[in-house]
């Protein structure tokens, strides 16, 4: 799902940086106020977990990759704002040190994976697990569904961002200047792989970790993310 350099036009990259700047600012302020001291190590572990799981990239036709993210799990445990910080750190390190995702596309990648994904998954989890006890199997099922839905919404948006580029940035004769694939190719390529493969990986990983914590550290589930 990482968008590389050269696939989004300068205006698109600038728009996503402009969108993410107030989100990063709000996230830092909210996390500073709400994150408990004993949860700080979990935030670091969440960032490291997201970093590692996103390194298992599978190329997708059209110039991007498919992979799990782990962002919904971090959102379930610490809240979506903390997840936004954790995944942003992972994405920036990947872009700057490993060339995984473009530097110009950090704003877009963070919008998809560090904002849309954790917030979508978090509220899906909250809706399905509403009033469920910490040891309820509904929590595990809610976590799996949240992981699946969150990553697929993010993948769909990445496909839309790719697919709009030929319409937004092209020469006088219609030749695309950046991503050459329109919506009819980009959206199915991104959404299809995640619906069929990577969404299920995200769902299984998220559900299994929640199930494990229900048995070994139920207090983490009880606190959850606010």
Image (spheres, helix red, strand yellow):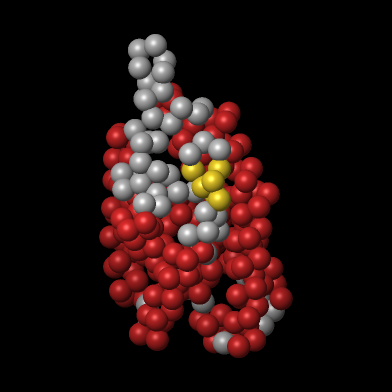
The quadrant holding residue 124 is bottom right
**Is residue 131 at least partly visible in the picture?**
no
**Is residue 30 at least partly visible in the picture?**
yes
Q: Residue at x 55, y 82 (%)?
A: 222
Can you say whether 136 is above or below 8 in the image? below
Q: Residue at x 60, y 75 (%)?
A: 209
Percent position (x, y) of residue 193?
62, 46
Question: Is 86 positioned to the left or the right of 139 in the image?
Answer: left
Can you say whether 150 is above or below 27 in the image? above
Question: Is 202 positioned to the left or the right of 88 in the image?
Answer: right
Q: Farthest right residue? A: 137
Please count the marks in the image. 0
Percent position (x, y) of residue 170?
37, 21
Q: Residue at x 49, y 43 (%)?
A: 64
Can you say whether 171 is above or below 225 in the image? above
Percent position (x, y) of residue 175?
41, 18
The quadrant holding residue 217 is bottom right
């Amino acid at each position: 799902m990482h968008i590389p350099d050269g696939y989004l036009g300068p205006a698109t990259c600038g728009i996503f940086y402009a969108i993410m700047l107030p989100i990063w600012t709000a996230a830092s302020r909210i996390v500073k106020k709400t994150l408990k001291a004993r949860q700080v190590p979990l935030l670091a572990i969440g960032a490291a977990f997201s970093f590692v799981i996103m390194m298992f990239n599978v190329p997708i036709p059209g110039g991007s990759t498919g992979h799990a993210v782990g962002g919904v799990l971090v959102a379930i445990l610490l809240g979506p704002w903390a997840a936004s910080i954790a995944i942003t750190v992972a994405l920036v390190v990947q872009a700057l040190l490993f060339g995984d995702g473009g530097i110009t596309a950090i704003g877009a990648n963070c919008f998809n994976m560090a904002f849309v994904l954790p917030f979508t998954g978090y509220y899906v989890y909250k809706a399905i697990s509403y009033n469920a006890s910490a040891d309820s199997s509904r929590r595990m099922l809610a976590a799996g569904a949240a992981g699946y839905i969150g990553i697929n919404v993010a993948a769909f948006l990445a496909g839309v961002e790719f697919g709009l580029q030929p319409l937004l940035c092209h020469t006088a004769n219609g030749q695309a200047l950046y991503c050459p694939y329109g919506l009819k190719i980009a959206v199915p390529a991104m959404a299809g792989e995640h619906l069929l493969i990577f969404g299920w990986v995200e769902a299984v990983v998220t559900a299994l970790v929640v199930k494990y914590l229900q048995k070994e550290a139920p207090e983490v589930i009880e606190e959850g993310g606010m």
